[in-house]
Structure formats: C-alpha cells, structure tokens
Image: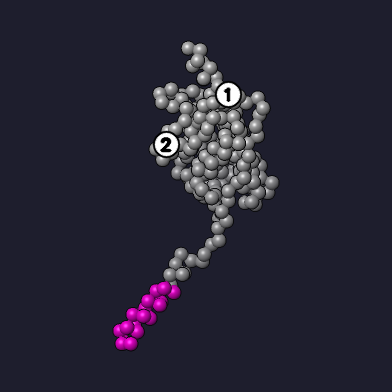
C-alpha cells in the first residue's frame, strides 16, 4: 500500500472513531405511553351517528413528545431522559378514539386527519395544557382542552366546552407522574364521550323536530 493510501486509511479510521463521541455521552431515554380506560355511565344515550375526532395543540411546546413540567407558575421545563411515545395531541386522540370505541355507544368513530372528513359529527379538541404542574412541592398531571362538537357538511357548531382534569402524582418520580396522566386522560375521555353523546342526541332531536 502506498504512503498516500496509508494516510487516507488512517484518517478515515480516526473520523469513524470520532463519530461515536459527537454530541457527548449517550443518554438513555425511557418512552412512556399512559394506560387509559373509559368509565361508561349507564345513562348515556346510544347513537346511530358517527364521529370524527381531531386533536391539535394550542402551542408548539405541547405538540411534542417531550414531557412538560411546570415547577413554578412562569417556568416550563421537560423531564430529562423521558418522553411520550407520541406527541401529546396524538396520545390524546388515540385515548379519545379508544374511549368512544370502548363505550359501545356510538355508531362509529374515526380519526380526523390525512384529508379524511368522515363522520356525521366532528369533535375538535384543542389541547391547552398537558403538563406536570407543581403546587408547592406536590406535582399534579394537568390536562386542559377546549372541545367543539360540529355537524359536518354544513351543519355548524353544535356545542363547545372546556374540560380540565388534575390528578396528583403519588410521588414526584416520572413513573408515578405518568400514572397520574393515565388517570387524567381516562377521566377526560369519560367526560368528553358522555358530553358528546348527550349534545349529539339533543341536536339530532332538535333537527328532527324542525
């Protein structure tokens, strides 16, 4: 091998060796996906119509897989070495779709997005809070959304309501905070499903009465 070839080979080896250290030491990341469940109220009406669920974030910080934490009122950070399995709005959309499915009370449910506008009704959810909030030294998983139920294909706004759920973490550890988020998402899903079914039934009844 020529001297030039030896020099090139040595330089390449050094470059490859250096690539592993770019950006500093590797940090292990734990990915979380909170378990959720809907609590069915026997008084909920059964609907033969369908609903399409769309969820979006009110700001860029929430449209992220990072787990947000607010240690003080005017400060927001994220947990190091932990993230959601998906962006917060997508996690919530999945939980809501599953809540409608598991309720057994609606004709069908779809995700809104990708050009799809299927469904008789659209449920649009704007996520305003999806973060750990400290009250003194006690952390709470806080989820706040603005929900709008609309009749698709020209029907307009049917109803709107703000929902907020805060569940205390049993400890400040991330695992316990994630469990609190799972409970908050479950409570939110139960409230949103019940509200949608009731508002949808009232709208259907008023439309038939005209």
Visible residue check, residue 204? yes
Residue contact between numbered discs 2 and 1, judged by CB atoms under 8 Å: no
What residue do we see at 58% from left, 24% from top? 198
**Which residue is situated farthest in the right direction here?**
170
Q: Nearer the viewer, residue 154 or 162?
A: 154
Q: Is residue 188 above or below residue 18?
A: above
The kind of secondary structure the magenta stretch mainly shows is helix
Residue 116 shows which numbered tag? 2
What residue do we see at 64% from left, 44% from top? 180
Answer whether residue 7 is magenta in the image: yes
Visible residue check, residue 147? no
Q: Magenta residues, as a range?
A: 1-17
What residue do we see at 44% from left, 32% from top? 118
Q: Is residue 73 above or below residue 18?
A: above
Q: Assess disc 1: are there few (<14), some (14-19) or many (≥20) residues with their C-alpha within 10 Å of its C-alpha.
A: some
- Chosen colour scheme: one colour
Residue 3, percent across and down?
A: 31, 87
Mark 1 secondary-structure assignment:
helix
What residue do we see at 55% from left, 22% from top? 201
Q: Assess disc 2: are there few (<14), some (14-19) or many (≥20) residues with their C-alpha within 10 Å of its C-alpha.
A: few
**Which residue is situated farthest in the top direction here?**
210
Q: Earlier in the sequence, mark 2 or mark 1?
A: 2
**Disc 1 target residue:** 198
Q: Nearer the viewer, residue 101 or 198?
A: 101
């Amino acid at each position: 091998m020529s001297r030039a070839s030896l020099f090139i080979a040595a330089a390449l080896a050094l470059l490859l060796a250096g690539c592993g250290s770019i950006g500093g030491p590797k940090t292990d990341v734990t990915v979380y996906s909170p378990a959720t469940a809907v609590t069915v109220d026997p008084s909920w009406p059964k609907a033969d119509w369908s609903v399409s669920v769309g969820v979006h974030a009110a700001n860029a910080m929430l449209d992220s897989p990072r787990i947000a934490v607010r240690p003080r009122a005017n400060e927001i950070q994220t947990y190091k070495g932990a993230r959601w399995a998906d962006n917060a709005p997508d996690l919530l959309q999945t939980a809501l779709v599953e809540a409608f499915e598991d309720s057994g009370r609606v004709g069908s449910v779809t995700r809104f997005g990708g050009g799809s506008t299927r469904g008789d009704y659209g449920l649009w959810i704007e996520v305003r809070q999806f973060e750990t909030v400290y009250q003194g030294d006690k952390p709470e998983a806080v989820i706040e959304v603005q929900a709008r139920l609309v009749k698709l294909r020209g029907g307009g706004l049917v109803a709107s309501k703000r929902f907020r759920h805060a569940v205390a973490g049993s400890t400040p550890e991330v695992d316990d905070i994630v469990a609190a988020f799972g409970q908050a998402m479950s409570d939110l899903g139960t409230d949103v499903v019940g509200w949608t079914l009731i508002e949808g039934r009232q709208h259907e009844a008023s439309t038939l009465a005209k």
